[in-house]
Image (cartoon, grey):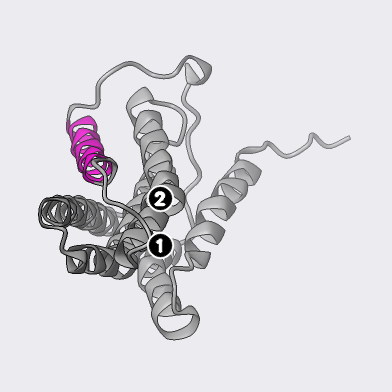
């Protein structure tokens, strides 16, 4: 992967990650205000940000993080700090989708009573992203024991880095113009398909008989 494309992918990862954290802090602020004042409009605004901004930034951050691991020497499972970041991101995304978002919708529609759970949850989300930022800079801990000997990764096709950079934009366009809700199709196809392609090219060809 060329240095320019790598720098662009790092830039996109930092941009989406910081945006994700800022939106989590915005949700925290709105939830605290709603809990303190009883103003349901605070939850309506928080739901709007959650469904139209935060989720796209979260998907972009997760995708670019995975692809940075896949396209560089770090890999998916070779270093503890990379693996911990991936696990935290997946937990955050699933908790946000299946727990926080439905609870926020119920609050916005007046079908639930406000509790400290929402402010705490959104603050934990922002804190986890900040911790992941520290992991990216400090790169603590050693290599994972099951990858003691690094395997050189095959170079991707020349067009692939450009495709990776276009994936978050394409997924956002699908969500906005076609589905009307987040649908990270290119994200999933690329993040799942690339490791299969790489493993196929890492497998040595069978010896001639």
Q: Earlier in the sequence, mark 2 or mark 1?
A: 2
Q: In front here: 27 or 13?
A: 27
Q: Look at the image and say whether residue 126 sits in the magenta stretch.
A: yes
Up-down: is 143 above or below 105?
above
Depth check, front residue: 2 or 55: 55
- Left or right, 84 with reference to 118: right
Q: Is residue 124 left or right of residue 150?
A: left
Residue at 38% in and 25% down: 79
Marks 2 & 1, CB-CB < 8 Å contact: yes
At 23% from the left and 39% from the top, the residue drawn is 120
Residue at image point 27% right, 67% down: 53
Q: Is residue 157 magenta?
A: no
Which SS class for mark 2?
helix
Q: Which residue is mark 2?
A: 67
For the residue pair 118 and 190, the one nearer the viewer reads as 118
For the magenta stretch, what is the residue range? 119-137
Quadrant housing residue 74: top left
Residue 87 seen anywhere in this rendered image of the structure: yes
Which residue in the structure is indicated by mark 1? 164
Is residue 1 visible in the rendered image? The answer is: no
Q: Residue furthest bottom?
A: 177
Task: Report x, y in % for residue 81.
Answer: 32, 27
What's the magenta bit mostly, secondary-structure-wise? helix
């Amino acid at each position: 992967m060329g240095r320019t494309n790598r720098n662009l992918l790092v830039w996109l990862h930092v941009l989406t990650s910081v945006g994700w954290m800022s939106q989590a802090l915005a949700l925290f602020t709105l939830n605290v205000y709603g809990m303190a004042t009883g103003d349901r409009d605070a939850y309506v605004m928080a739901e709007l940000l959650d469904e139209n901004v935060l989720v796209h930034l979260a998907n972009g951050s997760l995708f670019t993080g995975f692809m940075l691991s896949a396209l560089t020497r770090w890999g998916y499972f070779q270093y503890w700090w990379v693996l911990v970041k991936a696990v935290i991101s997946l937990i955050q995304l699933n908790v946000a989708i299946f727990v926080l978002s439905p609870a926020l919708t119920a609050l916005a529609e007046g079908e639930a009573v406000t509790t400290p759970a929402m402010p705490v949850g959104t603050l934990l989300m922002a804190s986890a992203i900040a911790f992941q930022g520290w992991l990216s800079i400090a790169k603590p801990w050693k290599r994972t024991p099951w990858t003691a000997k690094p395997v050189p990764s095959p170079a991707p096709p020349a067009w692939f880095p450009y495709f990776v950079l276009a994936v978050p934009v394409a997924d956002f366009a699908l969500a906005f113009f076609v589905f009307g809700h987040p649908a990270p199709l290119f994200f999933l196809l690329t993040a799942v398909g690339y490791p299969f392609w790489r493993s196929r090219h890492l497998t040595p060809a069978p010896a001639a008989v």
